Image (spheres, rainbow, N blue to C red):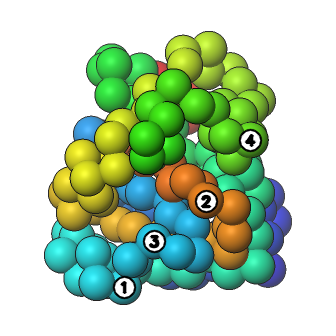
Amino acid sequence: MLIGLHPALNADVLHALRAMGHGDTLVLVDTNFPADSLGRGTVYGRSLLMENIDTRAAMDAILSVFPLDTFVDDFAATMAVVGHAEAVPQVHVDAQDALSAVGETRRIPAVERFAFYELAKQAYVLIQTGERRPYGNVMLRKGIVGPDGRAG
């Protein structure tokens, strides 16, 4: 254990988050997502695990140390519900609430399923959570930490 770090942030996840640069993306995925096969094609080269926690808990942990990119419109994305692109499942509401908790007021756009897979393939890292609800997949784009130590 370390002081000041969320206990769900394991060493592998912390390493990946620290290694990422401005504009790199991470993709949090649910238990049904093909994380192992797609994770092999990421910059990190393998998927990581945050087992036994859902999407919201994983986002809360990650956003405690991860600055969001404030300069782009595609700062985050969720996977749209197949056949019902306008649907907003509770897991997406939870993701939006996690962003709101860190002061982010922009709405997370939903991306078509296969377009989301392409985002995942281009990510720096995939992190598979224990989320069992469908569509528990969220992309986050890393921003910067300014000289004052705050997200910028």
Q: Secondary structure at mark 4?
A: helix
4 or 1: tag closer to the N-terminus = 1
Can see residue 78?
Answer: no
Where is residue 6 shown, x and y percent of the image?
77, 62
Q: How many marks?
A: 4
In the picture, measured across the screen, residue 65 lies left or right of residue 45, that is right
Q: Which residue is mark 3?
A: 33
Look at the numbered disc 1 and give the secondary structure of its residue. Answer: helix
* Point 45% across, 32% down: residue: 85
Q: Which mark is residue 90?
A: 4
Residue 36 is tagged as 1
Task: Quickly name the residue at label 2.
Answer: 134
- Towards the viewer: 44 or 73: 73
Q: Secondary structure at mark 3?
A: loop
**Crowd tier of the residue under label 4, counting other residues whose Cα lies within 10 Å: few below 14, some 14–19, many 20 or above:** few
Could you tell me which residue is drawn at 62 percent across and 14 percent down?
105
Whether residue 74 is situated above or below residue 4 in the rendered picture? above
Q: Which mark is residue 4?
A: none
